Every structure is written in C-alpha cells, then in structure tokens.
Image (cartoon, grey):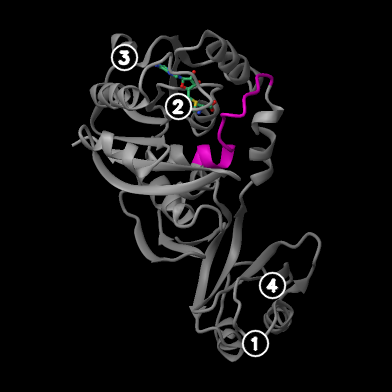
Amino acid sequence: MRVIFELSKEYDSLPADEVIYSIKGEKSSGYSLVEKNENVVVVDVEDEKINRLADRVALSFFLDKFLFSCEPDLSEIRKKSEKIEIPVNKGSSFRVRCNNRSRHVEFSSLDVEREVGDIFARNYRVDLKKPDFEVRIILTDNRVYGGIKLFEIDRKSFEKRKAQYRPFFSPISLDPKLARALVNLSEVGRDEVLLDPFCGTGGILLEAVLIGARVIGNDISRKMIEGCRKNLEYFGINKYELYQCDVGDVSKFVENVDAVVTDFPYGRSTSTSGEKIEILYDRGAEVICKVLKSDGKAVVGLPNEKSLGILDDYLEREVVYPCRVHRSLTRYFGVYKKG
Ligand SMILES: C[S@@+](CC[C@H](N)C(=O)[O-])C[C@H]1O[C@@H](n2cnc3c(N)ncnc32)[C@H](O)[C@@H]1O
C-alpha cells in the first residue's frame, strides 16, 4: 500500500529519516520510497508492516493511505478529489481535515475542507464527530497530498513517560520521543538485542522494549541502575538485563548485540571520576565496536562534532543529527555502522 507519513517538525530531518529506518527495522524487503521532504514521507510498503510502523514512529502525526498528490492549487485538488474511488459503502460517514503547512498558498484549510467535502458529500454522509473515515489533505508550499487516515500516532503516550513522571527522576534523561526516534535509527527489530552501555535512568531502554526489542543496560552508578530498574518495572517491563560496571567491562558480559543506542556522559553534570572525557569516549567507542555484531548499527549522542570523530576510528559514520535537547543544550547524535 502507498502510505503518507505526516511528519512532525521537531529535529529537522530526523522525522523523515526515522520513518525510513523504522521500515528497515521492520525488515521490510519490498518497500520503495516515493517521496521524502520536510513535511511528508510517501512510501510503498507491505500492508502487514503498517500497524507496526504506526506503533513504532514517534516523530510523525498521522499515517494515511495515499490517494493523490498535485500542485498546490484549489482547482487541481478539486479535479483529483472528483476522481477518487474508495472501497467503502455508500452511505458511510466522513469528514475532511486539512493540515495546512504552507506559508504561501492563497486559500485556507477551510476552503479545502469545503471543496473536498462537497465532492465526498455526493456519496457519503458528513459526520464531523465520529466519521467512518477521514479524508486528509496536507497542504505544503510545493505540493498537496490527499489520503485516508489510517492511524493517528499516540503522541500522548510519550508524554506519560517523560522523566518527571517516572518514579526515578534525573534531568539527564532524553525526551521519550527523541529516545524512540534514536532507537528507530538503529534499525533494531522485534526480539533483537539492543544495548545501552550508559543507560542512566533507562529512557532509551524503555522505548526499545516498547517496540519489542530485548534490552541490556549498563551504568557505572549503582543509584542509576537501581533507578533504571524501578522505571522499567513501573511501566510493567520485567524482561531486561542490567549491569553495574565501568563501560570498559561491558564486553565481559555482552557480545554480538544487534544494536547499540546510547547517550554518552556529558562530562559536565555526570561524573567521570576524574578521567578525561575524551579518554572515556574512546573507551566507550572501542567497547561498542567490540560488542556490536558486524553490520550492526550504533546511535550515539555526544556533545559536539569533534567528539563524534572519536568514534570514526572504530565505526563507519552514516549521518549526524544535531538536536536541541534543552534550551541551552544541543546534542549530536551520530549513526554508525560496523563494517
Ligand atoms: C547522559 S547519561 C545517560 C542518560 C540516559 N540516556 C537516561 O535516559 O537517563 C550518561 C550516564 O553514563 C554513566 N557513566 C558515566 N561514566 C561511566 C562509565 N565509565 N561507565 C559506565 N557508565 C558511566 C552516568 O552514570 C550516566 O548515568
């Protein structure tokens, strides 16, 4: 089925890439990318993968069944809508919602909803509250996309897992939506093993478990490991492995993991016991390379581009995403592959 992912505007190009990497993580063999830009990803993907993708992605709002795309012009939208045939009984109810992301088009969401609504009303009943189906029109500066809503991403569920709502709190934990997107960048699949060697309060592990990965966490701090356990259990998770040791010792317990996702110590608020931060990063990179299976992926958060270079000695860098995680803090997330 051809599907439209309506992307959120958080973290620049990350929402679009999250979709592509999630599809790879679901081991989709026959997918093909139709279009990718800052507003939407349009992709042909096997029907049986769509539910899982809707459960997986964090930085999208809706998944729609693709109906058409056209120039951002009201008469074009009308022409395309006239031609649509959808396999629902006549007499079913519908509503039209327009997501206006354009700064330049000279008509409004309401104009679009009215035009398209009038066309659909010839065969279907309007129900604005609980329709049988929802027609979605995404208006962008360069293109318009039309689709039937398949899923709305449950973004509220991410809010509930924010650091302040977990039993063990620490401000070092990432926003759950970002943590989920990082897990998705790693292409980890259901029942595959994901390691976070600097797991802290467990924010990354939590998001990985929720998409069906098996997780292993490690942290040097006993307080963190106890807190991480509390957080995982609080969300009903009881299948995990946690170790409390220096990152250098992780390879004593762990080998051949499918993916590593981690946010390295900041070297500011977290203690490094006097060790120079570059040395710790180098030791971390060496261990990640050692325990990752060949072809496996690592997604690593660091304070700057220079630090990312340390990992280049061990792994092949694919892409970097600078992400503002707090008002005054930007982290650089590098995606690496073990060659
Ligand atoms: C940026 S925090 C990770 C935050 C985590 N993603 C979360 O959701 O809470 C980095 C963690 O690395 C741990 N750490 C610092 N030095 C370490 C070392 N040498 N070996 C293992 N863990 C270490 C700290 O205790 C801290 O919990």
Q: Amino acid at mark 1?
A: Glu
Q: Are the residues at dot 4 and dot 2 in contact (C-beta closer than 8 Å)? A: no
Q: In the rendered image, which residue does mark 2 sit on? A: 267
Q: Amino acid at mark 2?
A: Gly
Question: Residue 328: x and y, percent?
Answer: 57, 43
Q: In the rendered image, which residue does mark 3 sit on? A: 248
Residue drawn at (45%, 9%), measured in percent from left and top? 244
Mark in the foreground, 2 or 3: 2
Residue drawn at (59%, 91%), measured in percent from left and top? 75
Q: In the rendered image, which residue does mark 1 sit on? A: 106
Of the image marks 2 and 3, the number of the one nearer the N terminus: 3
Q: Are the residues at dot 4 and dot 1 in contact (C-beta closer than 8 Å)? A: no
Mark in the foreground, 4 or 1: 1
Question: Disc 2 versus disc 1: distance between alpha carbons?
Answer: 50 Å
Question: Disc 4 versus disc 3: distance between alpha carbons?
Answer: 65 Å
Q: Amino acid at mark 4?
A: Lys
The secondary structure making up most of the magenta span is loop
Of the image marks 4 and 2, the number of the one nearer the N terminus: 4
